[in-house]
């Protein structure tokens, strides 16, 4: 909710921090530290927190030449897109397919997930992300 309010210009982090003094508000102030204002949707906030909690280097809303803006770029090479219902429309499916192909041709790996995946099966997302990352990152 905070990220949405920030993106809509309804509040600022400084304003919120200023209204959360004292020990009782420590948890709320800690939650504000997780806000970066880069999410395109609420579900992207959940996904970003999931990736970062795993220690994965996570960039959001990255503009990649020849591809466009992607939801996430993990470890510099794995694109993760979180698709809403509009991605099921024929026109968007065609656009997404072209972006996926352009991404692969440019050397990126791509994973796509929907709301249901993020909310109800985050452990599957984490397992698949790590499977791709371990295939490319020397640990």
Image (cartoon, rainbow, N blue to C red):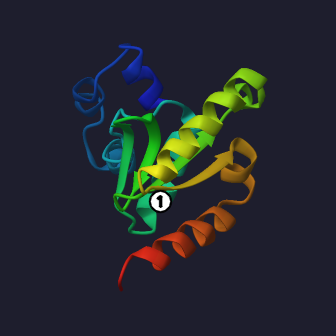
User: Which residue is denoted by mark 1 in the rendering?
Assistant: 51
Instruction: Classify residue 46 as left or right of residue 22.
Output: right
Placement of the C terminus among the 4 image quadrants? bottom left
Kindly identify the residue that appears in the image at 56 percent across and 75 percent down: 131
Kindly identify the residue that appears in the image at 38 percent across and 13 percent down: 10
Instruction: Classify residue 73 as left or right of residue 118.
Output: left
Q: Residues within 10 Å of mark 1 (few under 14, many from 20)?
A: many
Instruction: Classify residue 32 as left or right of residue 48.
Output: left
Kindly identify the residue that appears in the image at 46 percent across and 53 percent down: 49
**Residue ranking furthest to the bottom:** 139
Q: Quadrant of residue 99?
A: top right
Residue 6's place in the image compared with 33, above or below, is above
Residue 49's place in the image compared with 135, above or below, is above
Q: Looking at the picture, how far across and down is residue 100, in whole percent? A: 57, 44
Q: Looking at the picture, how far across and down is residue 51, in whole percent? A: 47, 59
Q: Secondary structure at mark 1?
A: helix
Kindly identify the residue that appears in the image at 34 percent across and 36 percent down: 65
Q: Looking at the picture, how far across and down is residue 124, in whole percent? A: 68, 66
Q: In the rendered picture of this protein, how many numbered marks are placed on residues?
A: 1
Residue sitting nearer the eye, 56 or 62: 62
Residue sitting nearer the eye, 137 or 114: 137
Q: Looking at the picture, how far across and down is residue 47, in whole percent? A: 54, 50
């Amino acid at each position: 909710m905070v990220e949405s309010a920030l993106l809509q210009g309804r509040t600022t982090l400084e304003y919120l921090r200023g209204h959360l003094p004292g020990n009782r508000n420590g948890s709320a102030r800690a939650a504000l530290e997780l806000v970066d204002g880069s999410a395109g949707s609420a579900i992207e906030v959940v996904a970003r927190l999931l990736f970062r909690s795993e220690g994965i280097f996570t960039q959001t809303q990255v503009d990649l030449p020849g591809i466009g803006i992607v939801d996430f770029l993990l470890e510099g090479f794995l694109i993760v897109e979180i698709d809403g219902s509009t991605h099921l429309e024929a026109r968007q499916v065609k656009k997404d397919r072209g972006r996926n192909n352009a991404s692969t041709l440019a050397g990126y790996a791509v994973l796509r997930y929907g709301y249901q995946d993020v909310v109800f099966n985050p452990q599957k997302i984490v397992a698949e992300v790590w499977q791709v990352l371990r295939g490319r990152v020397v640990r």
